[in-house]
Image (tube, rainbow, N blue to C red):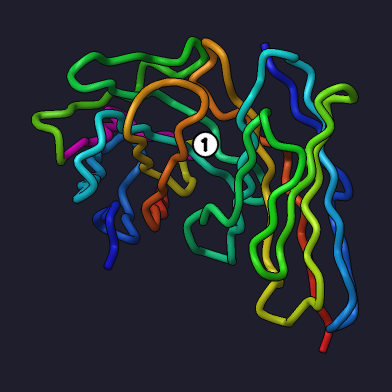
Amino acid sequence: DAMVIQNPRYQVTQFGKPVTLSCSQTLNHNVMYWYQQKSSQAPKLLFHYYDKDFNNEADTPDNFQSRRPNTSFCFLDIRSPGLGDAAMYLCATSREMGGRQPQHFGDGTRLSIL
Amino acid sequence: GENVEQHPSTLSVQEGDSAVIKCTYSDSASNYFPWYKQELGKRPQLIIDIRSNVGEKKDQRIAVTLNKTAKHFSLHITETQPEDSAVYFCAASGGSNYKLTFGKGTLLTVNP
């Protein structure tokens, strides 16, 4: 059974048209992460939530925002997608903060920009 | 910050042979080292991890070794099968660093 669920699996949007990706988890983990992964590259952390506390990576563009309305759900909002934002977006969770906590990934949403 | 180097970037082996992927890290405070397997178009899947109080860990055909002094860790896959073909990522984190720092990945191809 999938424990970190991302919807949709594939998303197509137009250049500059806002898009929202969603993630839900059944693990009741405190931490949720959003990663961007481009072809043949490692996942790149965009931001994470510890409970309701939001933490943005220093190099995450302002175009990317996130919401976590409750423990189970987290959203990634891209306000004005550019061609360079086409990528796989991965959601992950971990039980707690701290470097020794395993992260569990969802299947990802592949975003295409027309 | 932490820096993780991973080698080789591609590895091709014959079915039944062993495969070894090596990673080095820079931050001596790192104490958690997971390995992820990612098949094409799929999620990274945690296959094994090791913590710094352990030198070696094994799970069936997969083993990971850690040398804290040299700051390197390795993934060993024995009796490789075609379904082992994927991209493998090593990562490091620990201490006050909650983030996973990933290596650049190794594309493993197991030829039948």
Against B1, residue A29 (above or below) is below
Q: Nearer the viewer, residue B109 or B75?
A: B75
Identified at 49% across, 63% down, the residue is B42
**Identity of the amino acid at label 1?**
Gly
In the rendered image, the residue lying farthest to the bottom is B112
Identified at 85% across, 82% down, the residue is B16
**Relative side of B107 to A69, left or right:** right
Magenta-colored stretch includes residue B16: no
Residue A114 at least partly seen: no
Q: Which residues are magenta?
A: A73-83
Magenta-colored stretch includes residue A81: yes
Against A72, residue B71 (above or below) is above
Against A12, residue B27 (above or below) is above
Q: Which residue is mark 1?
A: A84
For disc 1, the neighbor class at 10 Å (few under 14, some 14 to 19, many from 20) is few
Against B98, residue A32 (above or below) is below
| x, y percent for residue A94 | 36, 36
* SS at circle 1: helix
| x, y percent for residue A44 | 54, 32
Q: Nearer the viewer, residue B66 or B75?
A: B66
